[in-house]
Amino acid sequence: MIKSRISIDKLIDIVRQGGRVQTGVDVYNSNGTLLLAKDVMVEKIKPLEIVRKNGLRQVPVAVNGGVFDASGKKINMKPAGMPDPLPEAFFDPEPIKTRNVTERLKEIQELRRFAKSISIKAQAGIKTAVNQIRQTKGEFDVDAVSEQAAELASLADQNRHPFAYLPREWFVYDDYFYSHAANVCALGSQVLHRFNSAFSSAVEKSLWSSPSLTGKGSSGMFSYYYPGEIDEMSFGLFIYDLGKSMVPEALLNKTSALNKDETELLRRHTGDFGFTIIEKNHLDSTVLSNMIQYHHGPIYEGEPGCYPVGLACGMMPPYVRICKLMDIYDAMISKRSYQEAVNQVTAVTGLFRSYVHKDPILQFILHAFVKTVGLYPPGSIVFLKNGQMAYVLESEGPLVLPFTDKSQAPLISKPDPFNVSKQTGGLVIDSGRSIRQPKKIWDCLPVFIREIASPGNQATEAVAAVSNI
């Protein structure tokens, strides 16, 4: 009899800390290959990592099995299901270990360069589509844009999403329309994948909890959304805002507050402008129609300031709620014609606190969102409360490398990185000071970081590349 299903990540953490696991039931992958034998006591993380690589997010533990801590005491595990509210720090306390600081610095820069190249290509694609819509009053090359969306969505398979490493200073508000589409599609696709994995597992567990099925194990193969559906949703995350192509550019870039008539005109991008694009391009899809119509709708019952007015939360499928959340998040952390970008920490914590405990499905979405975007992007600069500045090596923790003294003078010797979540006093992050990128504080960087994190003309090159398309 299956007693519970436990997160594979949780089991790996327990074994890493000296604990042991015995499932009491054979665990197979989708091809019928045995991954864990029921009577084997797992004492190393490698077998569990193999389970995770095979796509299993939860592991069944029978009544004759168990999970034990380093002293051999049996742990009473809470079964996987509805996520608990996220703690203040949001992340697991133990960060990914950086074996070599220099290698990690180089890796961060390579990921940034890769994300930059993909972003510029995606912006080119959406800019071409916008121009086509404006010239033809609604038509664009659907196949070309669909291929670009698929390339962005393919990044969702990576554990460390490259777009989470992009410095926002590469984008200026003149290019916001295009960078916004690329960012929402790339990061939103990973949020969608993470949500689908967690929610599918919870639904399957609930289905198999029926007394009539006692003693029978689930297949572990249920999926709330299937691959073809997710591909269509990722496409929607790229084009949901294309109705704005039919809104006058002067209105989109207006720096002052909109009047009532201007507000009504702008809101038509989810209405008749959006429908025009759907009809002229033969996009006969409920998924796309929902994303275009409802991405400004309520993602919990009674949310204020939403439209269309009177739309019930029940009309907002999870993929549309994800679209709205990513739309808001990227708008907050991007420079706009009428506002400066918000600190990423402020944006993530603000959204979390605004939406937590409002709706059970939204709880799953929030978990997927925070895990995807992170609070402290690797490659960014943070301030510690003692006045030191530190370079973020890993967002989990985060793991940081201090590089100045308390007066912000560069350190001469190379320091050791440390996990901020395990510090107190002056070695914790000063959340009241904005995250900065290396090129903003170039004079403070020590030589060993300058040699690798050289900013060059990244901002100028990126902006020029998009502007010349």
Image (spheres, grey):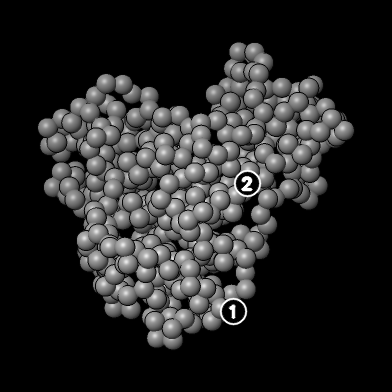
Q: Which mark is residue 197?
A: 2
Q: Is residue 459 above or below residue 426?
A: below
The mark closer to the camera, 1 or 2, is 1
Q: Which mark is residue 282?
A: 1
Q: Which mark is residue 101?
A: none
The answer to whether residue 450 is left or right of residue 225 is left
Percent coordinates x, y for residue 397 in the rendering: 40, 33
Percent coordinates x, y for residue 332 in the rendering: 33, 51
Q: Disc 1 to disc 2, how far (Cα)? A: 31 Å
Q: 174 or 241: nearer the eye? A: 241
Residue at the (44%, 71%) spot, across then down? 243
Q: 189 or 403: nearer the eye? A: 189
Percent coordinates x, y for residue 99 in the rendering: 41, 39
Residue type at numbered disc 1: His
Q: Quadrant of residue 5?
A: top right
Residue at the (44%, 34%) spot, across then down? 90
As drawn, the residue found furthest toward the bottom would be 136
Residue 322 appears in the picture as rendered: no
| Disc 1: CA contacts within 10 A as few (<14), some (14-19) or many (>=20) | few
Name the quadrant of the C terminus. bottom left
At mark 1, the secondary structure is loop
Residue at the (41%, 50%) spot, across then down? 305
The answer to whether residue 97 is left or right of residue 54 is left
> Do the numbered discs 1 and 2 sit on residues whose CB atoms are within 8 Å?
no
| Disc 2: CA contacts within 10 A as few (<14), some (14-19) or many (>=20) | many
Residue 127 appears in the picture as rendered: yes
Name the quadrant of the N terminus. top right
Residue type at numbered disc 2: Ser
Q: Is residue 417 above or below residue 469?
A: above
Give the mark, 1 or 2, whose residue is nearer the N terminus. Answer: 2
